[in-house]
Image (tube, rainbow, N blue to C red):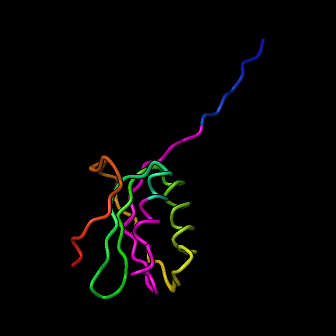
């Protein structure tokens, strides 16, 4: 009699601090980011920076964060994304949802 090996999907929690450059303010970039992140079950925040970039901090499944990064690279219809910089950090689990914040101004 043999035995059966089963594999379950391994979920890895991650945290990414992301900076998006280009035409990313005044084009509903934060709103789209919030909707994308929420649909991917990610938590964190997004904000405009004084230098014209958008910054976000996202926590959750690493594959979902990678999917969010792909969406950020394309951007919403009116935006023009020139660059997306990602800094991976240790997961902290400190957020309950994904919000637009105004701390950057």
Query: Residue lying farthest top?
Result: 1
Left or right of 92? Residue 23 is right
* Figure label count: 0
- Residue 68 appears left or right of 96: right
Residue 60 spot, x, y in % from top left: 42, 50
Q: Is 22 colored magenta in this rendering?
A: yes
Q: Position of residue 32 (x, y in %)?
A: 47, 66
- Above or below 5: residue 24: below
In percent of the image, x 50 and y 51: which residue is there?
A: 40
Q: Residue at x 51, y 81 (%)?
A: 79
State the image coordinates of residue 45 (x, y, percent, origin top left): 32, 61
The N terminus lies in which quarter of the figure? top right
Q: Which one is in front, 30 or 4?
A: 30
Residue 69 vs residue 11, the one in the foreground: 69
Residue at the spot x=60%, y=34% of the render?
8
Boundaries of the magenta span: 9-34
Seen from the viewer's position, the closer of residues 67 and 87 is 67
Q: Quadrant of residue 30?
A: bottom left
Does the magenta segment cover residue 29? yes
Q: Is residue 35 left or right of residue 54?
A: right
Residue under the point 72% across and 22% down:
4
| Residue 66, x across and y down, in percent | 53, 61
Residue 20, above or below 88: below
Name the quadrant of the C terminus.
bottom left
């Amino acid at each position: 009699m043999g035995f059966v090996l089963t594999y379950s999907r391994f979920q890895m929690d991650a945290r990414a601090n992301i900076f998006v450059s280009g035409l990313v303010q005044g084009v509903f970039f934060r709103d789209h980011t919030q909707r994308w992140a929420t649909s991917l079950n990610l938590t964190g925040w997004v904000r405009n920076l004084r230098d014209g970039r958008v910054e976000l901090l996202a926590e959750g499944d690493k594959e979902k964060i990678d999917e969010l990064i792909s969406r950020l690279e394309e951007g919403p219809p009116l935006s023009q994304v020139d660059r997306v910089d990602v800094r991976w950090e240790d997961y902290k689990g400190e957020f309950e949802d994904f919000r637009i914040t105004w701390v950057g101004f």
